Amino acid sequence: MKIIEANGARIPAIGYGTYTLEGQRCSEMVAKAIETGYRHIDTARMYKNEAAVGEGIRQSGIARDDLFVTTKVWWADIAEGKLQASAREAIETLGIGAVDLLLIHWPNADVALEESIDALNETIDLGLTRHIGVANFTSAMLDEAAALSEAPLACNQVEYHPFLSQDAIYSACRRHGMAMVAYSPVGQGGDILENAEIVGIAARHGKTPAQIVLRWEIQRDGVAAIPRTKTPERLAENLAVFDFELSPDEQAALTALTLRRKRLVDPSFAPNWDRV
Ligand SMILES: NC(=O)c1ccc[n+]([C@@H]2O[C@H](COP(=O)([O-])OP(=O)(O)OC[C@H]3O[C@@H](n4cnc5c(N)ncnc54)[C@H](OP(=O)(O)O)[C@@H]3O)[C@@H](O)[C@H]2O)c1
């Protein structure tokens, strides 16, 4: 497994995304993901599945230090005091000790960035997490957050796939030594996977379109991806992206598709996204 070195955090390049998974099914899939070889699990307070994720991790029997676990505090809870309380609840709910990475899930225009970044830093001192980072930050917000943060930020988790360029955010992540963690990395299983260019490259490599897309992401320096699936067979499929390489021409062909700028996740509270 490729590891992304990000300001002291060592992030496995493919993680298991758990959004929408709940209860016993979630625990079973998390345990199965670990059995399949995943060493990075992504959850959030908002997914309401931290207890099930923690249960799956315990069921797997894996040594805690062999696994990289991320959770996120919701944007409504990032004021001083609230953020630390939410992080504490997350850790109690997961029941696996400190997480490896704690993220602010979305920026919040009503809370000063300095206040939320200070509170985030305190979660390290409180022993709730080993590393901190953000999600859904624009490149300008990332510059500001990196300057304010005492501990270096490990990542910005953002939507990224072949139909959405994130060049401005990618450059900002590189500037600050941070990883860019790609969410919705297989385009939520939509028309990306039927794109003729991608299907053609997949046929040439004897791989699936999802594997081509994930490979394109993680072949870029400093990028990790966290595909989600509730289909047991796809766990192995989405992890089997380390035994082949895309040529520079193939990489460029997928990169050309990013100019479509097809954003899948854009809630009312999203920031003013970077224009590329
Ligand atoms: N920070 C944020 O604001 C944020 C936002 C969104 C997501 N996330 C994180 O990122 C994770 C992934 O993003 P996502 O859930 O939006 O989208 P995604 O991983 O791009 O897509 C998941 C969908 O794709 C399908 N799929 C997965 N692997 C496939 C394959 N090999 N072939 C065909 N279809 C496949 C799944 O179907 P089946 O389940 O039926 O197999 C599911 O419907 C989330 O689970 C969450 O952990 C974070």
Image (tube, rainbow, N blue to C red):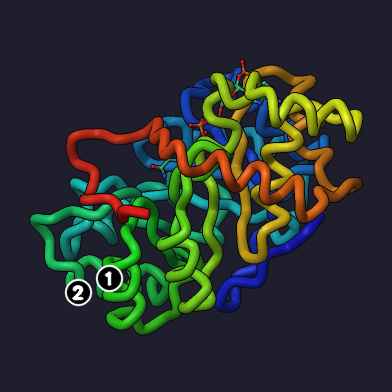
Instruction: Classify residue 2 as left or right of residue 163.
Output: right
x 40%, y 57%: residue? 103
Q: Nearer the viewer, residue 216 or 53?
A: 216
Q: CA distance from mark 1 to mark 2?
A: 5 Å
Give the residue pinned by disc 2. 114
Q: Is mark 1 within 8 Å of ligand 1?
A: no
> In the image, ligand 1 is in what quadrant?
top right
Q: Nearer the viewer, residue 97 or 31?
A: 31
Instruction: Classify residue 59 as left or right of residue 102.
Output: right
Which quadrant: the C terminus? Answer: bottom left
x 42%, y 72%: residue? 124
Say whether residue 197 is visible.
yes
x 58%, y 52%: residue? 69
Q: Nearer the viewer, residue 166 or 19?
A: 166
| Spot occupied by residue 168 in the image (x, y as percentages of width and height) | 41, 62
| Spot occupied by residue 169 in the image (x, y as percentages of width and height) | 42, 61
Say whether residue 88 is visible.
no
Give the residue pinned by disc 1. 117
Circle 1/circle 2 CB separation < 8 Å:
yes
Q: Amino acid at mark 2?
A: Glu
